[in-house]
Amino acid sequence: MDKQKVLADQLDKKGKAKFSSYQVLVIILLALTQFTVVLDFMVMSPLGDMLMKSMELTTSQFGFAVSAYAFSAGISGLLTAGFADRFDRKKLLLFFYIGFIAGTFFCGLANTYPMLMAARIITGLFGGVIGSISMAIVADLFLLEQRGRAMGFMQMGFGASQVLGIPISLYIANHWGWQSPFLMIVGLAAIIWLAVIFKMLPITKHLEVKSEKSAVKHLWHTIRLREYRIGFLSTALMSLGGFMMMPWGSAFAVNNLGVSYAQLPVLFMVGGVAALIIMPLVGKLSDKMDKFKIFTIAAIWMMITVVIYTNLPPVHFAIVIFMNIVMMIGIMSRMVPAMALTSALPQMQDRGAFMSINSSLQQIAGGIAAAVGGMIVVQETKTSPLQHYDTLGYVIVGIIIVNILMVYRVSKIIKDRQHLSKL
């Protein structure tokens, strides 16, 4: 039996595409890798206030520490994009994941700002490519009708990192220092790396599609296609909005809204629970309804909640929790349908390169957003409120409006292709 025959018997009696047992296993493994990679990046935000006070960093310095990961991840993705479709995707995943583990380990050893910057760069060089490899694996092993659900479940790693990872990270950081969460991630990621070795089958179907292009030509071929560039831009714009707010989440909550360090784990956990519930539901919904309509509704929802949240004065903790939940609904509900649409753009032989470039531009855009956010937001002293955080909210609204227009163009390309295929 063909080891890669994972799409067999995928239609149930109602004609709905169902998952095979192997596909379920792949989703679990990818979700676990996403959990550790996302946690490594996401934990910088809740640790932000603690880290800035510990190392006496300015908002700009912390912004650049966040950007260091994003920029290195983006550069790494561009450099590897031309080779992404020339190797077994499982081997690529294992290679970059072990590099990510090493970089995270160095983060756990950092005790100066230069060491922290170097560690984040190393982590980004490897960790930033893992998401694109995972997306290519999903595109290879799942039908378009399944990808909304597959990506919804896979991206549950984002919610799980907040429900489990961030509260635990904050707890041990309060006891053993801000470096300790990174060492915890290393131990967990090492176990997952071994599980991928023994449980995931080789993913080589794309290698059967022969390409005579060199790595550089393959990269250029992927970039020069207009339809692909539209997908790249839509993803980059989606990243710009999120990264501009995220690094300052804990600092804004503590210094502006009056949230205590003891309440921070609860705040992030509740937001994570909301994400865990929302993402599978939106994934199923996006397989049944028009993906662009779902994205647009979620984007408008996000614009409204972001403006309200960034203008909040000190309020009761229950209101802060409520606003985080409704904001998370908008953020998560636009990610799933947008990613499902974008994954349908590349041809099979281009998927690895496309996903690598897409992830790279997403990371670079995020790095720019974090750096710009660090220059917009100002904190006069370690304990004073953040200034101009509301300005970020208005900038994000403008970015989301443009993003809606770009995702519409992606949706139209996919629909036109489907229409032509039926003729």
Image (spheres, rainbow, N blue to C red):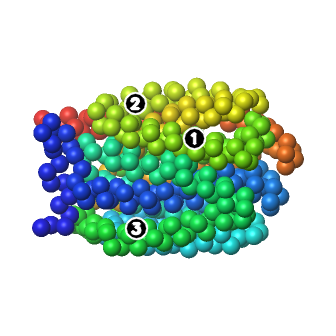
Does residue 329 appear left or right of residue 352 in this picture? right
Q: Position of residue 17 (x, y in %)?
A: 21, 43
Separation of residues labelled 3 and 1 (CA atoms):
31 Å
Separation of residues labelled 1 and 2 (CA atoms):
23 Å
Q: Earlier in the sequence, mark 3 or mark 2?
A: 3
User: In the rendering, which numbered label is found on residue 294?
Assistant: 2
Residue lying at 60% horizontally and 31% vertically, measured from the top left = 322
Residue depth check, mark 3 versus mark 1: number of the one nearer the observer? 1
Q: Quadrant of residue 81?
A: bottom left
Label 3 crowding class (10 Å Cα cut-off): few <14, some 14-19, many 20+? many
Q: Position of residue 31 (x, y in %)?
A: 41, 56
Residue lying at 67% horizontally and 60% vertically, measured from the top left = 172
Q: Quadrant of residue 50?
A: bottom right
| Dots 3, 2 in contact, CB < 8 A | no
Separation of residues labelled 3 and 2 (CA atoms):
31 Å
Label 2 crowding class (10 Å Cα cut-off): few <14, some 14-19, many 20+? some
Mark 1 is on which residue type?
A: Val
**Which residue position is annotated with label 3?**
93
Q: Secondary structure at mark 3?
A: helix
Please tell me whether residue 49 is drawn above or below residue 282 in the rendered image.
below
Quarter of the image that includes the N terminus = bottom left
Residue 78 visible in image: no
Does residue 168 appear left or right of residue 188 in this picture? right
Residue 172 visible in image: yes
**Which residue position is annotated with label 1?**
270
Q: Secondary structure at mark 1?
A: helix
